[in-house]
Image (tube, rainbow, N blue to C red):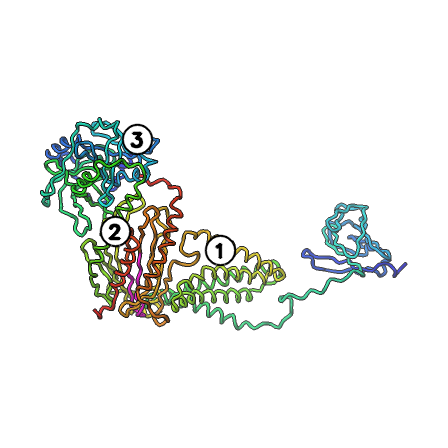
Amino acid sequence: MGGSQMKGVIEILDREGQVRAAFKLGGAEQGRVRIGRSPDCELVLDDVHLAGEHAEIRATESSAELVLFPSINGGWLGEHRMSAGESAALGGQALFQLGATHLRWRAADAPLPPEVPLADHQKRQAHRSLWWLPVLMAAWACLQVFDFWLGAVPDTKLIAYAWPLLTPVIAALAWAGVWALVTQLFQHRFPFAKHLRRVLIWALAVSSLDYLLPGVAYSFGWPRFAALSDVLMPALFAFLIWWHASLVWPRVRRSIGVGLGVLLMVALGLRVGQRSEEQYLFGARYLSALPPPTLRLVRPKPPEVLLDDLRELRQPLDKMARKDSNAPAGSEEEE
Amino acid sequence: MRLLPILLLCLGLAAKADAAPPPPAAAASSPQAVSASARRIYERSRGQLLQIRTLLKNQDSQASVGSGFLVGDGDRIITNYHVVSQFALEPERYRLRFATTDGQEGALELLDIDARHDLAILRPAAADAKLLAGRGALAFRPRGEPLAKGERIYSMGKPLDVAFSIVEGNYNGLVERSFDPLIYYAGSINAGMSGGPVADEDGRVVGVNVSAMIFSQQMSFLVPGPFAEDLYRKSRDAKPITAAVWPRLRDQLMAYQDELTKAFIAQPWRTAGVGPYRLPVPQEEFMRCWGGGTPADTKGLEFQRSQCRMEHALYISGGLQTGYLDVQHENYDGRKLGPLRFAKVYSGSFRNEAFGSSNKIATAPFCKEEFVGRDGLPLRAVVCLSAYRKLEGLYSLSILVAPVDSSVEGALGRLNAPGVSFDNALKLTTHYLQGFAWADRK
């Protein structure tokens, strides 16, 4: 009989479903593998929820079955509860639980699942240089200083720059720290620099857009161009969350992207709904940026052009005025 | 139950009097200040003096109170429009009643309104006409006998629903820089006296109590008597109003804004000679101007501000005062700031302008904006209009203009004209833009 019974592997899984150890069947144990805490067992597990001899796997030439011995906790085959004395066929592959331990049976002739490619963070790589970190930090800090300088009166003391400079820098560090902690929770690593890089790049891009959008709108005389920021900024925020989340949960980043996309659409939809009585669904009523005159690339028009534009407002205004005039009148203030 | 609100009101008044320096007219309430002639005039007029109450249609609780007086053959009553405006705008929710000085009460019917002069004419309902019969009426002082400055006049009414009163004051001429004539009255008129008569020494009506001077506090203004007399003549036999008066208000406002816009546009702009620009500043014929600026030793932006506006607006409802003009500007000198910092402050000022929002009264503002050239001076101009929902064809106009030729100097001009027609909004826009130019290219 020896050597002719079915071969296979019993895998011991950790809480996240990863294989922690594997026990190969088909050697000297003659088709019987007892599982439990007792030294007499072929497969010894250090699980206090197991009996000394908790269960057994019996392999014949063509099949394998799981037999449970008397115990308090019994076991499960898949979702099926098994108690002492019960037995069940294992087939080519089966997940089962004894006590608190998750195990998997994999017969030698069952097809192997394909090899899973490594996620980026799992690849060994040379230590990455961190030269970009001071560069990005410096850029971010400079932008803060510039922002504060713009709004300050001449001869402002240097010490006044401290908080406007430190607050955004601390905010970026804290944000990256929180994401690194979340990553620690799920991946047991702390990629602080990676999260910091992402948030700094994002913040620099968003701050530049803050200048760029109204600047372009002004230069070319396209006031509505600045309204793009009302759509872009929420979208960019969703992107930032996705960017961080894809470091934490790389295998489901597509689903996270879809989820965030749906949330973004809902948020934008709500905004549109709230502004149904406004002239524009997005953006400010008018372009308020007045940058230095060299940025203006269009020639001023005669006042008549503006008057002609104004005439176009009459119809939509009258329509809007009629639309809500049937709304129930609330109570007047009493004098 | 009734006493509590009155008590609170009195407390409120007392608190007010404590906070502000006591007005000279406060003496009118002390016994020795009530002269013999005030007593005589009150005795003579008390029969014609009425309280006008606005009550909820199906309840006896009063929504507002004012005063009024009998005119003509003693069967017509003059009061303020704002005293009866709740009924006028929602006749299905409110009703009007009168109360005489001797405690008689009856129903009233509204015959006509004059929103421009804040007047209304009423008559007793047929069933209650007998309560007012035989009381006579107050006569108007003839137009050919103008009052002299300083003459004693007597304002009557029922302030705060407390008691019928007479307040002695002085005629101080017409309010200067007012589009429509208003009498400046040195005496204290309280809420609830609105609509009451103001009589001369002979008991003849020279004006009607009104306090709807929107932008001034602690001043009392009167509607000159002739406007009330005109309304009486025009509408004494009008049919009672049973539907909301919006169409009538619209017509009256339409005529008023036409007259006002014409008069305003006919005036040339004055020149404000500060900085490199000529900015539109209106004549002070019916507007009043105020100015201000930064201290000379300021380190940052230096600016000067000017605001000219009409102080008298038309009262339409508790939430709507309209029909006035407001022109303001600020000039900025940012040479100490440099171009980048100036751009930030300049943009901030340009952004920091409110245009209102969508509500029951008007739509949200709809705007157009453009770079506009005025004699070679490039301007950024934003024009916003919102439409009044119940006053079809009337709009609230706001224009915002900033010169954009200099990197360290600028100005921000704004014109507000609530309650104008679309055509007049366009005319005012043209007129306003014409007020901007280079200072040295006159």
**Callout in the foreground (1, 3):** 1
The answer to which image quadrant residue B29 occupies is: top left
Crowd class of label 3 (few under 14; some 14 to 19; many from 20; radius 10 Å) = few
Q: Is residue A132 magenta?
A: no
Q: Mark 1 points at which residue?
A: A268
Q: Can residue B28 be seen in this view?
A: no
Judge whether A225 appears above or below B19 on screen. below
Name which residue lies at 55% across and 56% down: A262
Name which residue lies at 30% across and 70% down: B406
Judge whether A204 appears above or below B210 on screen. below
* SS at mark 3 in the image: loop
Which residue occupies the foreground of this view, B233 or B107?
B233
Compute the Cα span from label 1 to label 3: 52 Å
Label annotation for residue B382? none
Q: Can residue B319 be seen in this view?
A: yes
**Callout in the foreground (2, 1):** 2
Q: Mark 2 points at which residue?
A: B257
Task: Answer yes or no: are tags 1 and 3 on the same subunit.
Answer: no
Would you say the magenta stretch is mainly helix, strand or loop?
A: strand
Q: Give the range drawn in magenta.
A: B398-413
Q: Mark 3 points at which residue?
A: B2
The answer to whether the residues at label 3 and label 2 have Cβ atoms under 8 Å apart is no
